[in-house]
């Protein structure tokens, strides 16, 4: 039986923490060799360390999936977790298919809990996610967690529950999913919130056999076929990759697990959760998760801020004293030898800047 006090299932729970992305909109703190999940933006611990600690409240085992170049950094920050290196970076669907197949070979009759490594999550996570793990254990459904929205956000996808369907009674902890919706415009976001849709937080749970069955007829079926034919080791620490699996990984198109699996699967359940959540995807997002000072300025990292006639700014640094005079609504970031200054309303455009830096070999 799972040792967690937050689940009822007899099955062991294995958390899969996705830690292969870069988080380029948080440049210059995030760089090619220092991804977002390694950053201590919300306190002394990195986002990855916070996630692994949170996962252990629910899971019996934690597996961090990452790319080869980040593996050593993951081991330093999560020494008690298994580290699984994906054969190639192909977004979340191939990564989670590979992880699920390896976990299926290593553990009998378990439940997988998949979660990003770099999000902010408030209190109540373990109890809420434990309910979803139990739904995955007790049904033949893939489970997604829907965050109850606090505003009509245009930067997140939405999950539409099927309120008319029977989910094992009126007191059920879940509802069937009617549809997934991409990031909306402002008016559409308002209509989604009014209609009772949820934010898609990229949190999922499933039994391995249910996920693998869905993958068999998905856009990544060729990778599934290669994994099924391979003699996968029971030891997650084994780093040798079957040549056919590596070839299938190399040939796979990058695709998210939302698009490749969840949006096309027939039996998906959404478990509503009400904890505070934010993907902390850009510098302006810090305002939603960090307490501001008297001037409305938010500070993150190792930074001292002094302001004169300045207000409502976001300041982040890795060991700097930053003074602001007569400015407002800016994000000011000093990390290593790099400085970024951007209006908060254009924080999403940092990703465009990073593409230019990558083309120049300067990222």
Image (cartoon, helix red, strand yellow):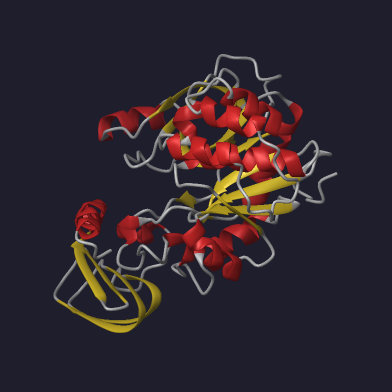
Q: Where the C terminus falls, by quadrant? A: bottom left
Residue sitting at x 82%, y 51%: 3
Residue at the left extreme, as displayed: 326
Residue 38 in percent (x, y) is at 48, 66
| 2 lies left or right of 222 | right
- The answer to whether residue 147 shows anywhere in this view is no
Name the foreground residue: 315 vs 88.
88
Figure check: 15 above or below 290: above
Residue sitting at x 67%, y 27%: 210
Residue sitting at x 41%, y 34%: 253
Figure check: 267 above or below 92: above
Residue 234 in percent (x, y) is at 75, 46
| 69 lies left or right of 206 | left
Q: Report the number of numbered marks.
A: 0
Residue 359 in percent (x, y) is at 21, 56
Residue at the bottom extreme, as displayed: 321
Figure check: 298 above or below 209: below
| 162 lies left or right of 259 | right
- The answer to whether residue 50 shows anywhere in this view is yes
Residue 75 sits in quarter = bottom right
| 231 lies left or right of 293 | right
Q: Where the N terminus falls, by quadrant? A: top right
Residue 25 sits in quarter = bottom left
Residue 211 in percent (x, y) is at 63, 29
């Amino acid at each position: 039986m799972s040792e967690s006090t937050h689940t009822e299932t007899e099955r062991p729970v294995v958390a899969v923490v996705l830690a292969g992305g870069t988080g380029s909109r948080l440049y210059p703190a995030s760089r090619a060799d220092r991804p977002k999940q390694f950053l201590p933006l919300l306190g002394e611990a990195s986002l990855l360390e916070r996630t692994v600690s949170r996962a252990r409240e629910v899971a019996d085992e934690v597996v961090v999936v990452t790319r080869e170049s980040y593996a050593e950094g993951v081991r330093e920050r999560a020494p008690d977790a298994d580290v699984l290196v994906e054969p190639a970076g192909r977004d979340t669907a191939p990564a989670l298919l590979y992880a699920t197949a390896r976990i299926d070979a290593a553990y009998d009759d378990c439940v997988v809990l998949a979660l990003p490594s770099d999000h902010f999550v408030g209190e109540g996570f373990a109890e809420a996610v434990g309910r979803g793990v139990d739904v995955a254990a007790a049904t033949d459904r893939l489970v997604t967690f829907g965050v109850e929205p606090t505003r009509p956000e245009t930067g997140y996808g939405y999950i539409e529950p099927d309120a008319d369907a029977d989910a094992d009674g009126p007191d059920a902890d879940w509802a069937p999913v009617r549809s997934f919706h991409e990031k909306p415009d402002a008016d559409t976001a308002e209509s989604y919130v009014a209609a009772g849709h949820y934010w898609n937080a990229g949190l999922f749970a499933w039994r391995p056999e249910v996920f693998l069955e869905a993958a068999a007829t998905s856009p990544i079926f060729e990778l599934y076929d290669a994994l099924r034919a391979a003699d996968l080791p029971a030891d997650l620490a084994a780093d040798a990759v079957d040549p056919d699996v590596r070839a299938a990984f190399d040939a796979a198109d990058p695709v998210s697990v939302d698009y490749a699996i969840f949006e096309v699967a027939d039996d998906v359940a959404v478990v509503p959760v009400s904890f505070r959540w934010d993907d902390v995807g850009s510098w302006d997002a810090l305002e939603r998760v960090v307490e501001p000072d008297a001037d409305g300025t938010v500070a993150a990292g190792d930074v001292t801020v002094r302001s004169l006639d300045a207000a409502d700014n976001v300041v982040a640094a890795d060991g700097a004293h930053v003074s602001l005079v007569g400015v407002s609504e800016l994000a000011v970031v000093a990390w290593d030898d790099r400085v970024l200054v951007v209006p908060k309303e254009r924080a999403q455009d940092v990703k465009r800047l990073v593409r230019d830096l990558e083309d120049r070999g300067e990222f």
